[in-house]
Amino acid sequence: MLNQLLNRLQQDAANWDKFQHCFKEMDIPAKTLLLHEGEVSQNLYFIKKGCLRLWFNHDGKDITFQFFVEDEAVSSIESFLEQQPSLFSLESIEPSTVVVLGRDGFNQILEKYPDINAGFHEIVLRRLATYADHFISRIRNNPQKRYNELMQSHPHIIERVPEEYIASYLGIPVDTLSRIVEK
């Protein structure tokens, strides 16, 4: 995603100088909060290396809602686009390298290159589909089936993410996940 965006911008050498400063690369340690639940999101993050998660607090428990890895873009997209308080916190799970695009830069790019907007709409639509799949799975499927779906669709998550976050994502206690994994 980042490479596609940068390639598109760099095709217009005359304007690339105007936008190059909008992209800032950051190395962040594990367990770094990039956005706190309730804050208004001002940044879009492109993951070059690492793993991040979106989560929210429910009665003192953190509930992992989604994972993001290399070559994916992440933000509390609803907050970023609508400038309303975020429903989620965004945190690195492992040491990560991200490229940050602020909201002002994002808007300037879209103003100059409206065709790029289609790519961002695609990201939003994919996120909505992921939300729907996750929601339906939590209602329809038992913990074993939810784990099997995750293992089949995203085996890299199982390998990289601590069990406590996977259990939270699946909506089950860690000890239940441990029994499922042992089978």
Image (spheres, rainbow, N blue to C red):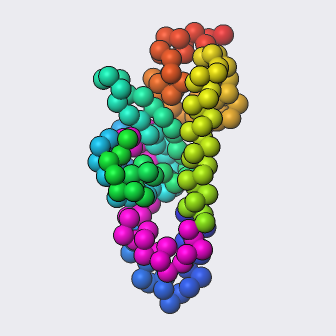
* Displayed quadrant of residue 19: bottom left
> Percent x, y for residue 129?
62, 43
In the rendered view, would you say 86 is above or below 71? above
* Horizontal arrangement in the rendering, residue 158 relative to residue 104 (left or right): right
> Percent x, y for residue 133?
63, 35
**Can you say which quadrant of the picture contains the N terminus?**
bottom right
Magenta segment includes 137: no
* Horizontal arrangement in the rendering, residue 108 relative to residue 3 (left or right): left
The answer to whether any part of residue 29 appears in the image is no
The answer to whether any part of residue 82 appears in the image is yes
**At 45% across and 39% down in the image, what residue appears?**
53
Outermost right residue:
152
In the rendered view, would you say 142 is above or below 16? above
Magenta segment includes 103: yes
Tell which of 72 and 156 is nearer to you: 72
**At 29% across and 43% down in the image, what residue appears?**
38
* Displayed quadrant of residue 152: top right
In the rendered view, would you say 158 is above or below 2? above
Total labels: the figure holds 0
In the rendered view, would you say 151 is above or below 180? below
> Percent x, y for residue 44?
43, 58
Tell which of 58 and 62 is nearer to you: 58
* Horizontal arrangement in the rendering, residue 70 relative to residue 94 (left or right): right
**At 46% across and 28% down in the image, what residue appears?**
165
> Percent x, y for residue 71?
57, 54
Magenta range = 88-117
**Can you say which quadrant of the picture contains the C terminus?**
top right
Tell which of 135 and 93 is nearer to you: 135
**At 60% across and 41% down in the image, what residue appears?**
130
